Image (spheres, helix red, strand yellow):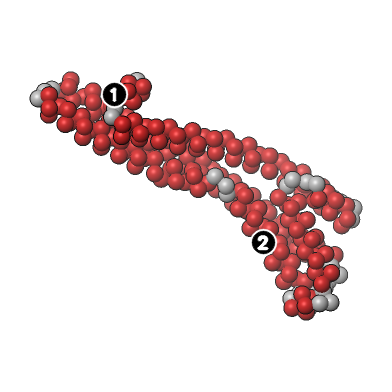
Amino acid sequence: MDLSLVLHSGDPILQSVFGLLILMSVVSWVVIVARTRQLWVIKRHQTQFMQSFWEAKDWQEALNLASKHPAPAAKLAWAGADGLRHYRAHQEGGLGKAVSLDDYLVRKLRTRLGQETATLERGLTWLATTGSVAPFIGLFGTVWGIYHALVGIATAGNASLSTVAAPIGEALVATAAGLAVAIPAVIAYNAFVRSNRRFGQELDGFTHDLHAQLLTEGGHGVR
């Protein structure tokens, strides 16, 4: 069936339904392509950084690597090192007396880990919303189209199969369009959530190892 014919023959509300579905589909595919590329780049940088970080000769070399690397783990390492420097600078004052180095580093790393995790989740809300809402938008378009098709048939006074089939068939295209928009969004959402979960676990493991390393560099300054 020619979709352009459906759009041309439909009323403004049905045309708005198809326009909204097309817009949602375009945005969803932009998100899917952008997120796929971003995850591929992040994972490549992450693998390179973690290997180089733990192979560094000393802590200073590791920090120099972290300062110029785009990997999320590098940002965690730099945040931890910054927290260690800040704690050392204030350990004789109120900060050092109020909290231990262990607790302070945990807070610092947890905050940065949350920021990096939030970055990985960008765009997922849109995909989830599209996957949930698009079928109902398509269904609304179908119901609206069938209603007007039946009104037109009643007005014409001709209820033969050839008269009923064409307008109702055109209205049903809206349901198919809603599913066509929703299915890729749902599949992509599930794939991204699974990928983010695995990446988050890897990042969480690195954070624990980094925390232990920072305590060692801090001279075991845990009270």
Q: Could one spot residue 176 in this view of the protein?
A: no
The image shows residue 75 at horizontal and vertical percentages of 74, 53
Q: Residue at x 75, y 58 (%)?
A: 79
Q: Could one spot residue 107 in this view of the protein?
A: yes
| Up/down of 44 relative to 3, above or below | below
Can you identify the residue that label 2 sits on? 111
Distance, label 1 to label 2, CA atoms, is 55 Å
- Mark 1 neighbour density, 10 Å: few (under 14) some (14–19) many (20 or more): few
The image shows residue 63 at horizontal and vertical percentages of 84, 54
The image shows residue 174 at horizontal and vertical percentages of 33, 32
Residue in front for this viewpoint, 64 or 194: 64
Determine whether, in the image, residue 212 is placed left or right of residue 202.
right
- The quarter holding residue 155 reads top left
In which quadrant is the C terminus drawn? bottom right
Can you identify the residue that label 1 sits on? 9
Which-is-in-front pick, marks 1 and 2?
1
- Identify which amino acid the numbered label 2 is placed on: Thr
Number of dots carrying numbers: 2
Helix, strand or loop for disc 2:
helix
Residue in front for this viewpoint, 27 or 177: 27
Determine whether, in the image, residue 98 is placed left or right of residue 159.
right
The image shows residue 70 at horizontal and vertical percentages of 74, 45
